[in-house]
Amino acid sequence: MRKYWMFAKSSMQISAAYSAWYWASMATVILKLLIMFYFWHAVYQNQSSIGQLTLKEMLTYIIVAMFVQGFVSGAGNELAREIKQGQIAVELMRPYHYLFKMIFMDFGQKASFFIRETIPMGLIAFFVIQINPPGSPLQLIFFLASAALGLWIGTFFDMLIGILAFWTVNIWGVQVLKEGVITFFSGALIPITLFPAWLQSISFALPSQAMVFSPVAIYTGQITGMDIYWTIAVQAIWAAALYILLNVLWNQAIKKVTIFGG
C-alpha cells in the first residue's frame, strides 16, 4: 500500500510544481463564481423563486455542485494516453497493479485540486456570496459520505471510458461526449428536479446523477429522512457495479497487449 501512497504524493508534488498554473486555477475559480453569481441574479430579476427554489437556495445548489463536479472526473484521459502511446506495455511489467496506481495518482491530483481551488472557492462562497450551510452536522456527514461515493463513481466511469482506447484509435470524441452527458445529466448545470418528468426519469436511471445531484440534494435538503439512506445505498450499488465492470473490462483488455521480450 505504501508504494501507492507514494504515487499519490508524487502526483501532488507535480501539481504543485507549476506556480503559474496554481494562480491561474485560482483566478479561474473566482471568475466562475462571479459568472454564476451574476447569471442567476439576472435570471431571478423578475421572480422570487424558480421551482420552489429562492435565489439563495439556487446559488447554494449551483456552487456546491461546482465543488462536487470538480472531483468526479478521474484518470481516464491519462489511461487512454498511455494505452495509445504504448506505455501500458511497460507498466504491466512493473510490480504494482496499474489501475490502483492510476487511482492513487488521481487521488493526489484531487487533493491538490482541493487545496488549489476548492478551499478558495469555499471561502468566497461562504463569506462573500453567503451560500447556505448544511442544515445540521448529521446532514454534513451524509453529504460528505455521498460526495465520496460520487467521487468513486466518477473515477470508475472515467476509467471505463479510458480503457476503450484498447479497441479504438482515438477516444477523444467519446470523452467529449462523456463530459457533455455527465455535465447535463448529473445536475451540475441546474437541479434535475427542474427537468421535465420524462427527462428526470432518464437522468435518475444513469450513474451521472449519483455523482453530483445526490450529494448536492442531500446538502441542500432536497433529499431528507429515509430517502438519504436509500440515495446513498443506490450510490454504493453504482460504485460496486462500475468497479466490477472496470475490472472485467480491464482483464479482457490486457489480453490484447503483446510484449516482445517481456
Image (tube, rainbow, N blue to C red):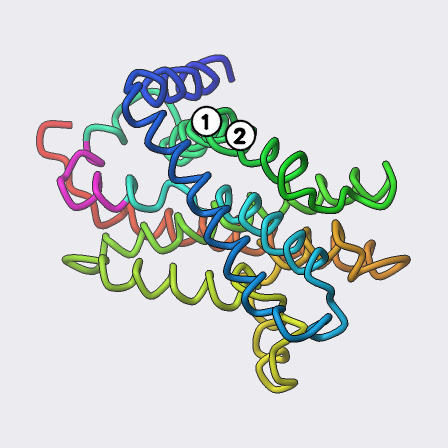
Compared with 224, 109 (above or below) is: above
Question: Residue at position x 62%, y 48% from top?
Answer: 64
The quadrant in which residue 140 appears is top right
Compared with 140, 150 (above or below) is: below
Q: What amino acid is labelled 1 in the image?
A: Arg
Nearer mark to the viewer, of 2 and 1: 2
Between 26 and 194, the one lying in front of the other is 26
Residue 97 image offset from top left, x and y in percent: 40, 29
Residue 261 image offset from top left, x and y in percent: 9, 28
The quadrant in which residue 45 appears is bottom right
- Residue 81 forms part of the magenta stretch: yes
Would you call the spot at circle 2 few (<14 residues within 10 Å), some (14-19), or many (20 or more)?
some
Q: Secondary structure at mark 2?
A: helix
Residue at the right extreme of this rendering: 225
Between 109 and 75, the one lying in front of the other is 109
Q: Which residue is mark 1?
A: 116
Question: Residue at position x 58%, y 54% from top?
Answer: 211
Question: Residue at position x 85%, y 46% from top?
Answer: 135
Would you call the spot at circle 1 few (<14 residues within 10 Å), some (14-19), or many (20 or more)?
many
Q: Which residue is mark 2?
A: 120
Q: Secondary structure at mark 1?
A: helix
Question: Residue at position x 67%, y 34% from top?
Answer: 127
Q: CA distance from mark 2 to mark 1?
A: 7 Å
213 left or right of 161 in image: right
- Residue 91 forms part of the magenta stretch: no
Magenta region, residue range: 80-89
